[in-house]
Amino acid sequence: MTTDPLDAIFSPSSIAIVGASRSRGKIGYEILHNLILNEYQGTIYPVNPKARSVHGIPAYPSVLAIPDSVDLAIITVPVEVALAAVEECGKKGVRGLVVITSGFREVGGPGIEREERLLVLCRQYGMTMIGPNCMGVINTHPDVQMDATFAPTPPLRGGMSLVTQSGALGVAILDHAKSLGVGFAKFCSLGNKAQVSLNDLLAAWKDDPETRIILAYIENFGNPKNFVRIARETTKRKPVIAMKSGRSEAGGRAAASHTGSLGGSDLAAEAVFNQTGVLRANSIEELFDYAMAFSLQQLPRGNRVAVVSDAGGPAIMCVDELVANGLHLAELSPATIRLMETWAPPEASLRNPIDLTPQGSLDDYRNALDAVLSDDGVDACIAIYVPPVRVDEVEVARIVWQTAEKHHKPVLTNFLGRTEESPGFAELVSHGIPSYLFPESAARALAAMYRYARYREREEGKTRIFEVDRARAAEILRRAQAEGRPRLAETEAMEFLEAYGIRTAKSRIVASRSELPDAAREIGYPVALKAVGSQLVHKTDLKAVLLDVRTERELLDGAQKMERGLKARGVALDGFLIQEYVVDGKEVILGMTRDKVYGPFLVFGLGGIYVEYLQDVAFGLPPLTDQDASRMIESIRTYPLLTGVRGEAPCDVDALREALLRLAQAVLDFDAIQEMDLNPVIALEKGKGYRAVDARIILVGPS
Ligand code: COA
């Protein structure tokens, strides 16, 4: 008895094809055909009320008529009869469903309700479902050998598993993989992912011994919070390489805050990938470039790369790409260079990148590879070869893999001008050496391996739950929502932050001038004075802000002047906000924005009014660990300003990190918040914390 509900999908002992058609070209026919062609190891039951047999196998008018138990049913009947067919599966005790049929949520209108009913049936009968509107599933394990898709290309067996949100792209990927000679363990086209999601598949394949690399085509992350957690656990065990289509949608709507205007960039997607260790590929080609590197080679221990070539140009292009992707050109030891001088042709350049020139013999090429791979200062090597007409490329390929085999360092190659059909490519790949058409591709693939190696080593840190006054924060939001206000008043925003333990500049609201001296004494001079009123939005323009007020006299005079000025402009004033005046700090911004694709995002950057122009910000996807928060803060270009330059005292970075973590907690607690903008937050000297001086909180509008 198996416990994993996905076993019924990927390792069924028997499959019913409900809608197994007698006509070639129809989906129900093709799936049955693929199951037979790939020698499915279980029992197949075609279901078709109009046929006595399909493909020579006895057919049944309904699943209920099948005499034995059925683990998995593939639904390929038209949508009008699909629900009735699914209900029969439920009654039969079928455990897994793959619903190929389309006409559900993706068509809107009645399709949405149809999908709801489909889900109800799954729940009612305890069935696990892939789809609807999907292309099917594959498991190449010899005990199963199931190709339950209508893809024309049956995959080879291998260590990659692919989950895709687009059936068509799935077919393209399977096709391309075959041409490269790389194989799959499992394949799943998710379709509408009404029940089983990308996250479920990642969680399942994380522990699947057959799956060594996970490939994913992602359109959206479903539940981003779960995605972060599951993807993190998965990438610690095996590489996940993903193609993500569609840019963030946040940019599409008018942003109401600084943070909002920053969220629309593709940086948000990058943050998800960086934080989870998922490697992003920008095309199918790159997906396979990476997949080939990961499946054939070991990870590099460091970032020092040697390039061996018989041509200068491609070597330089390779170096440029390596450096642009965070790798270093290895400095060869004098001993290595001396050794090479004993046999290299006089034209050769023996400083990394090594250019043997076309004068270099096969032996020179072998010796050069051997020399750099033996050097302790080299972590990886890219071998570039521009085949001259007279040399047999298979011989060169043999030299590369035979030399690489003697060393425990990754070696990638670029045989310029040689395609996947060339014999050199086949010789390399079949002996475990990834080979690329262009030097840049090899460089990027190696850089992806290094990024992943570093990710695997990095400390994930801990998520902390702070004791906060959640009820008070909830009440503030509830009140604004009840009054139909899209935005919290400034004082409410500050109170909300305080409820989550985020330090704001001390402030008091007073109704009249006479109350100002007491309030100022309570807060302590210097103070900032702001006029409060519903018409007062752009306070600076209205001269309704007075900073650095040091005495009671200055305070009262200033308040009187402000009152008069506003009166003259016909602006009503409800009272004053008097606030601790925070000096001697660095202005930073902390914020969050809710993206339609990725969910809530935290933002950290150097603050103030230039934040949109400088774009020096880092994104983080909650839940954040303490290490994530540190990485966010440390990743901005201007981070050195926070640690103190030119003899300045360092800022309280620890306190800022805690503020980010508290903000992350608030964001996860309240889906009603659309955007938060704490700008500026004044970061004080180490040990003195920070103060949020201004805050905006915008609520999610009615959808
Ligand atoms: N139980 C079992 N079989 C039934 C049935 C029932 N209740 N009702 C009809 N059938 C049989 C039909 O007789 C037919 O067999 P036949 O060709 O031997 O007569 C077979 O099921 C298929 O029915 P048909 O009406 O011919 O449908 P179709 O093959 O044209 O289309 C789908 C069915 C599911 C493929 C179609 O409705 C669909 O959804 N297509 C889109 C699929 C898609 O793109 N998915 C997403 C991919 S990424």
Image (cartoon, rainbow, N blue to C red):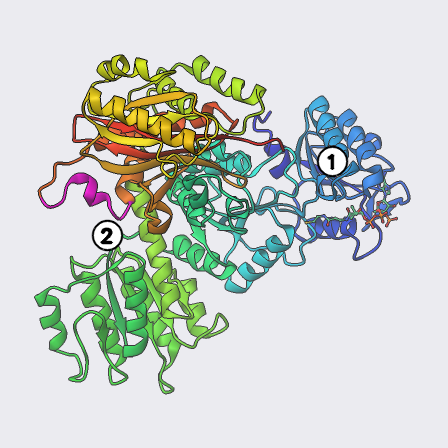
Residue at the (39%, 62%) spot, across then down: 434
Q: Quadrant of residue 105?
A: top right
Position of the N terminus by quadrant: top right
Nearer-the-camera pick, 583 or 182: 583
Q: CA distance from mark 1 to mark 2?
A: 51 Å
**Observer able to see residue 3:** yes
Query: Which residue extends farthest bottom?
Result: 390
Residue at the (28%, 44%) spot, across then down: 635
Q: Position of residue 474 (x, y in %)?
A: 48, 17
Pointer 1 with pointer 2, Cβ within 8 A: no
Q: Position of residue 62 (x, y in %)?
A: 85, 35
Specify the segment rendered in magenta: 636-646
Q: Is mark 1 within 8 Å of ligand 1?
A: no
Q: Earlier in the sequence, mark 1 or mark 2?
A: 1
Residue 638 relative to residue 35: left or right: left
Q: Position of residue 296 (x, y in %)?
A: 39, 56
Q: Residues within 10 Å of mark 1 (few under 14, many from 20)?
A: some
Position of the C terminus by quadrant: top right
Q: Which dot marks residue 302?
A: 2
Q: Which residue is mark 1?
A: 112
Q: Quadrant of residue 253?
A: top right
Q: Nearer the viewer, mark 1 or mark 2?
A: 1
Tell me the amino acid under the disc marked 2.
Gly
Nearer-the-camera pick, 147 or 458: 458
Q: Position of residue 75 (x, y in %)?
A: 75, 40
Q: Quadrant of residue 661?
A: top left
Secondary structure under tag 1 reads helix
Q: Residues within 10 Å of mark 2 (few under 14, many from 20)?
A: some
Secondary structure under tag 2 reads loop
Residue 512 relative to residue 156: left or right: left
